Image: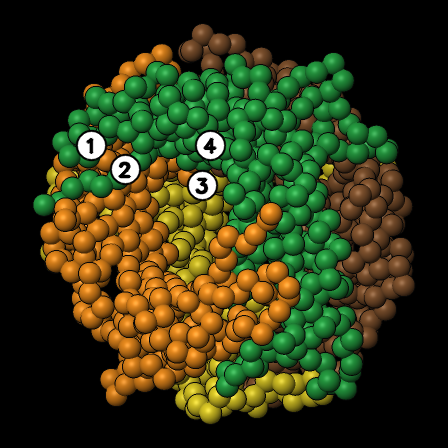
Chain colours: A green, B orange, C yellow, D brown
């Protein structure tokens, strides 16, 4: 006997630009929204019965409709509103999950002053919020960031590791340490100033990265996770992934030149991948 | 108290081109390998103690070394050899996971004949194998494919769905159905002709897709998963993800022209996302 | 005095999927169209006078409208129709240029037979046609292809080059030769079976690549261009760009293993870039 | 008779990270370098004679070697040094062209202060310098930027354009204006403070963009080019390309909601493409 074990469906990559017009200028937000629903959809899979299917096209419309009516100040609050809207109108849905990814936009600085209505795209760093809820259940909120590329040009070494038959890496007390940070932390509350907490967590991680005397990616990653948890009481767990984006020292001795940690080749692949979950012990 | 809850690390995007020289021509394989190790690495995170750390650079070397010595005929067998090599030499590692992604290369056809030593890159379709094992445990093998973009220009409709205040989608008994198939199936064995099974599963899914009278992506997806399980006894579960890559009918009536399902705009975003796990009931 | 020296504008990335319904199945074409107009648009730049500006949004509509009405069998013919349509209705336009890029779709083969209505995305190879015309002038047609990744695993060497203080490359009579072919040829006619000529030129270049005893990318590139010109009288010039996508032999001697041209690392950067224009002497 | 009409070759995508160690911290530069040589290489194409070929691998080494020895303060000066090095040692080369693209890195700000040795990747904006020289000739220098995504949320309209049978665009006096600026300006000198000039030109263009009352992309583009030329005497020409990255107002009236320029869908394709060359009249 063959059966449907699990299923979910929804709409991905719903892009949204929201302009808020104020007396002193505009605010600009660019979001990419994903909606995923789980529920009583077996008859659609087994029999092609669409009577319980909310079209993903309608989800797209809902994303825009709720965004227009929303007065949420954060992605997290907007995601909760969107989930409430969907669960209330769709009893056949047992749980909904919304993920919002925010792109970076910065106000243009013209002649030393912030311009009220002109903006510039920032880095590829993405702010994320992932919220889910079962019918009549509590919200589960996790927020995070991705694609934050950071580099230490000092205070990073890697020594004392296993040296075996296939080892070719040289030990060093001074290397470049470049990573593309991905982090996601879990909230223990449904109501908070999520933007302020995000800012605190992000800045704490960056400060730890910048000042750490790093013996390995592993050690710095744990220190960053620990610092995040120490800085904000309302999170109980943080996942970090820090691919090691290698910058290889160019061997110029073949050409009679020294290379005192000055000229490197940045490489995209292969990349080390270092992952950790740090949590508050129960 | 803050603690490390989980951790793993490894090397990603280790690319490998293997040329096998035979009397009648060469064989060409391009693989991207990822190695991830879990184990007793807490002291690295807590204290910067690297004494149990196998550098990811050494993993890269190991990927090449094992590839050279291997006589495996499949990605799955190669992944098992690589895991064995790593677990045997690294008792501090509790489990290893290897993922191999194979790119498509096709032999050039020149004047109607396969050329023995010249090749062309195929589509972006990727064949995958993900294998893991705990020290002294059994191998767990899953294989799959990704980025297989397929299109039905007939026998696809979408009708009878929920119609509410935010519905704007028109019902249709004749639409384009384009998806980028991602599938992963789980083996119940450690020893099989994995290449032959992969081929059977892939062809079965494609045949089902082509011939299905589709009432929804959901229905076709389940039919494909069911057919895969029916075609190969040695798998017990398959996960499918089928984003709906929409092709929108252009409204030419504004210009006095009919458009009888002939001119469409393909769009990349937003995309429907339909996921299902189909399994053999225990 | 500052002035506008040149200007042109248009619409890029207009995507189009055309399904032709026939008694024995459907034909599927996916095109990306770009339209660029040059003309008397200085007042728009100088004064914001839009009275001579055909909106790019209208160009997009025109792409679809002409595609629906067209019975062209080739991208080249469609591009000429589109240019005629635009030049005729817009006397302020002095010249128009249309570029069409066609994506690869292949019919699915099910149980050994071509399926009439189901398709699979092919490789990233793109077929191109670039057509331009001045008001009352003749059409200028160039066609080509891009992103055709090909590999020779035999009959390729590179020896006898300049050896100076900064040389580290080893000479070899046996290497992998991988490139991403870009070619564009110029037609001397406005009327031909462009699809057939394209096919001949493409196959001739591939056959030359496969069978050439290559002493360098330069030599093979010229041989391919020459063969293309010899195969089709109706072209008088071909531009080729062949980046050398290096596959580096892995040094396994450090680990006590030989590597007889078997295990390579494919790399994306840096890449050699070899360009040539080959023509029929006047 | 078939012949080689033109040829050039070189190395693309040579990536380089340069760390300069100072008493108050480090400077970090990431460059992507391309070298292209033109010269007496016909025998390589015709006969596979490599005796005049400087391998592209050696060019890569040269990029690193010259970067190490260079004390250039700008990409432009470095490019000139690299060209001199290559032309001097290779009399068979008639001209060399070097293009440098610089990625954005910013110093991390920790607790309100610039960190001396830690950095963050900025936006995808790229600074470019393209320099070429014939043997014994003068340098020709052009610099520019690419991928600078900017947005006006006020002071942008588009009205009074041609309205024909295929027009569907609505006139508006208030729209979002988003573009991905590409610009390249030509220097009339070989010696200048290129970094300072670049900064002036870039800031002038941004200020013009921000403050312009825009009647069209065309008008704003010309104003930006004109302002750049007026701000720096040492350039005589600037090319601008400004794709119109459309943000479409969502029609919420279908759902009983107004949308007073608040909720937009950003789209990647199709895109308007507006190009202009602005110059100082001779």
Q: Secondary structure at mark 4?
A: strand
Among numbered discs 4 and 1, the one appearing first in the sequence: 1
As helix, strand or loop, the secondary structure at mark 1 comes to helix
**Chain ID for label 1?**
A
Which residue does the numbered mark 2 point to in the structure image? A7
On whether disc 2 and disc 1 are found on a single subunit, the reply is yes
**Label 3: how many residues lie within 10 Å, few (<14), some (14-19) or many (20+)?**
many
Report how far apart the C-alphas of labels 1 and 3 lie in the structure: 42 Å
Please give the residue where the numbered disc 3 appears in the rendered image: C33
Residue C200 is situated, as x and y percent measured from the top left of the image, at 32, 63
Foreground pick, B175 / A150: A150
Residue at left 68%, top 41%? A231
Q: Nearer the viewer, mark 4 or mark 2?
A: 4
When the figure is inspected, residue C223 is found, relative to residue D176, above or below; the finding is below
Q: Dot 1: within a 10 Å radius of its alpha carbon, few (fewer than 14), some, or many (20 or more) residues? A: many
**How far apart are labels 3 and 4 at the CA level?**
45 Å
Q: Which chain hosts label 4?
A: A
Describe residue C234's horizontal placement relative to residue D70 as left or right.
Answer: left
Picture layout, residue A217 above or below residue D244:
below
Q: Earlier in the sequence, mark 4 or mark 2?
A: 2
Mark identifier at residue A140? 4
Residue A29 at x, y = what percent? Answer: 61, 28
**Front label number (4 vs 1):** 4
Instruction: Tell me: D84 left or right of C92.
Output: right
For the residues bearing labels 4 and 2, Cβ distance under 8 angstroms: no
- Check whether the beta carbons of the residues at disc 2 and disc 1 lie within 8 A of each other: yes
Q: Which mark is residue D56?
A: none
Q: Nearer the viewer, mark 2 or mark 3?
A: 2
Viewer-nearest of labels 1 and 3? 1
Which is more toward the observer, C52 or A88? Answer: A88
Say left or right for A30 vs C166: left
């Amino acid at each position: 006997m063959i059966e449907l074990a699990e299923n979910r469906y929804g709409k991905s990559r719903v892009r949204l630009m929201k302009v808020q017009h104020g007396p002193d200028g505009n605010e600009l937000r660019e979001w990419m929204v994903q909606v995923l629903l789980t529920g009583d959809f077996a008859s659609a899979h087994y029999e092609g019965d669409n009577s319980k299917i909310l079209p993903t096209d309608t989800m797209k419309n809902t994303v825009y409709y709720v965004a227009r009516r929303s007065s949420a100040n954060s992605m997290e609050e907007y995601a909760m509103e969107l989930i409430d809207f969907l669960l209330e109108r769709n009893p056949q849905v047992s749980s909904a999950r919304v993920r919002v990814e925010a792109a970076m936009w910065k106000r243009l600085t013209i002649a030393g002053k912030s311009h009220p209505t002109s903006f510039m795209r920032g880095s590829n760093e993405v702010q994320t919020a992932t919220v889910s809820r079962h019918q009549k259940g509590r919200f589960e909120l996790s927020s995070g960031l991705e694609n934050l590329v950071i580099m230490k040009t000092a205070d990073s070494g890697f020594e004392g590791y296993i040296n075996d038959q296939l080892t070719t890496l040289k030990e060093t007390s001074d290397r470049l340490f470049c990573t593309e940070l991905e982090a996601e932390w879990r909230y223990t509350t449904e109501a908070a100033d999520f933007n302020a907490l995000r800012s605190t967590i992000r800045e704490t991680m960056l400060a730890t990265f910048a000042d750490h005397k790093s013996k390995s990616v592993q050690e710095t990653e744990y220190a960053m996770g620990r610092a995040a948890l120490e800085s904000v009481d309302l999170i109980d767990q943080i996942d970090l992934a820090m691919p090691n984006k290698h910058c290889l020292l160019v061997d110029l001795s073949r050409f009679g030149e020294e290379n005192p940690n000055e000229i490197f080749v940045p490489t995209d692949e292969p990349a080390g991948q270092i992952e950790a979950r740090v949590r508050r012990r129960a």
